[in-house]
Amino acid sequence: MCCFFLILYCRAQSVLIQKGIREGKIPVHILIRDYARGVVDVAFRNGQLSAQAYQKTKPPYKAKWSGRVPSEKILRDKYYPKDLKSDDLGYLSIWSSAIGSLGDFGRYEVESALSHWSGRRLSRRQIPRKKLFEEFKQHLDVNQMSLLSKLNPFSGISSKSLRILINYIDPDDTQSEEDRKKQEQEEQQKYKSAIKEFKNNLDKRKRQFFEQEIEPYLDDRGGVNDPLDRFDTDLGQRWIFNRVVQIGWDPKLHGEFDSSVNRYENHGRSAHKPERIGKKYQWIALFELLALVADNFEFKESSWSEKSSNYEGGWQLWVRDIDSSSILQDKPTNTPGDVPVFQRVIPQYNAWQQNHSIGAWVKNSKKLPNPASVIELTDTEGKAWVVLEGFCEWQEETPPEYKKYDLPTRTLYYMFKSYLVKAENGDKFFGWGKKQRFYGRWMPESHEFIQVFLAEYPSYPAFLDARPNGWINEARHGKQKIPASVLVTDEEYLNEGSTHDCSIDESINVKLPAKWITDRMKLQQKYKDGRFYDRQSELVACYPSVFDRQPPSFLLMRKDKLVTFLKKEKCSIFWTLLGEKQTIGGGGIGQPHGWQEISGVYTFSKKNELVGQMVTEFKHATPQQKRRDVKK
């Protein structure tokens, strides 16, 4: 029934959005548009919107950019307080936050968001200045190119930057200030002469083009600076200040509250501190500005790139806040009935050898928990599950008279990652894996997707734009080749608890089965909480830590479903084990007693039983670590 009403709601919203597009009444607010696009996407996927109509709902829209923004002088004369000693500072709180390089909001929020756009209008054909320069040079003869090269300061004709370079190379240069000024004047004169000589060798049309399109933008390295490569941040900051005033922020109405809201508490830069009313107005203005800019200016491939791209949604700007698709809580209160329950999740470990020294315990590689008993679990209903990814830890108890970690605490942990490999490469990969030491986490791993909503996994545009994992054959950081292509079996959703909306206090992360697996098994995340079901509505994969924050944190999958899937896809699965036996705490630095590195590889046998091996290697403490321990 809920799904039925959701479809009706999406259909109604998509009709309103289409009408708004036709009438040019799409809200000028980047986040409102982003959430509306999400509704449209759901409507389209549920067959409530044709492909043709769906295409029309994609940005850019038709909000007009007037470009009429008051200059800083006009705004300063009108709104900047004349007497800073006065108790009534007027608009200073907005001014100091939004305008200039020292304003936190203007610097960290406005500048960061606007860096995704250039200053080139979508409605005009504005060729990048560098491209114009390169095309211009292609039409010069050999002599003209030779004369043009003399404009480069490193070829002998210089400017101030060459003087800076000389000082950097030879900081002990004893040349007097008067001699330096004289040399700079000589260099400037040479530069002017070189420009003049170059232009005199151009025909009338080339010279006119050079003077209008190239010369004003020449830099001191023989290239050009294009002011349109980046959107004018100062313009954006002034627009926001002006808009805050337009929509009603008034120091007479809001000044007293804004000046006292954080007076008695030091929240620093915390995103969860109470906000001034003026700051809320600034957020509204910023999101309106971004919508206008998205409709009218060229979007860049990345904030540091000069290549153009297409703007698709708010996730590209890192301005999204509340995940409207998820109702997960950072402090869960209940667990759904179909989430598996286990009598014991990890085996007991009691070999703390408290009668032996820490050094003797660390060196002992016997009586370690069997990794296979962690990888495969049986729930209270008798169903077998396997851990696709997870971390578990054992620690000795701290005596009650001490705080935790006041003493060196004997600790052991296991970290499991799993990978799919084509069955034809299984034996080769297993043989290779037995020889490896996985310490250092150099094998491929999943990555967090942050600006993606949970319900957008695994096939909505925001998630696909995050470049999900695929089949790869290289280790992390390019350290070495892997003998066969592997697929990392998990992805990770992360909703950070540091968001400005304060919808959650702490971060929420959900481990999810990899997109390739989810697609091939035709799994559906019905409740948008990390539980995945097959077509028979049976739970196949889940991340119980979402509902119970107690460790360990395991991504689980039904063993029988996985085995059937592997056989169908002609794949094998392998688990890598990375672990460490060590001490934590005690006030020391490093591991003065050494530590034990643990590695292993496991897979299913032909009878679908877990087989594999674990190896350990003791590592001695460095001389520095030993000295620290002695000093303590």
Image: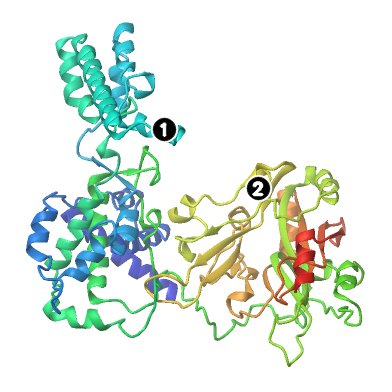
User: In screen coordinates, is 37 left or right of 213?
Assistant: right
> Residue 620 appears in which quarter of the rendering?
bottom right
Q: Secondary structure at mark 2?
A: helix
Q: Which residue is mark 1?
A: 173
Quadrant for the C terminus in the image = bottom right
Residue 19: give x, y in percent of width and height: 21, 58
Residue 127: give x, y in percent of width and height: 26, 30
User: In screen coordinates, is 134 left or right of 365?
Assistant: left
Q: Is residue 7 above or below residue 151?
A: below
Question: Residue at the location (76% across, 63% down)?
Answer: 625
> Residue 408 appears in which quarter of the rendering?
bottom right
Q: Is residue 557 above or below residue 255?
A: above
Quadrant for the N terminus in the image = bottom left
How dense is the environment of label 1, judged by Cα within 10 Å: few (below 14), some, or many (20 and up)? few
Q: Secondary structure at mark 1?
A: loop
Look at label 1 and name its amino acid.
Asp
Residue 110: give x, y in percent of width and height: 29, 57
Q: Is residue 88 visible?
A: yes
Q: Nearer the viewer, residue 245 or 370?
A: 245
Q: Which residue is mark 2?
A: 476
Residue 169: give x, y in percent of width and height: 46, 32
Q: Nearer the viewer, residue 287 or 472?
A: 287
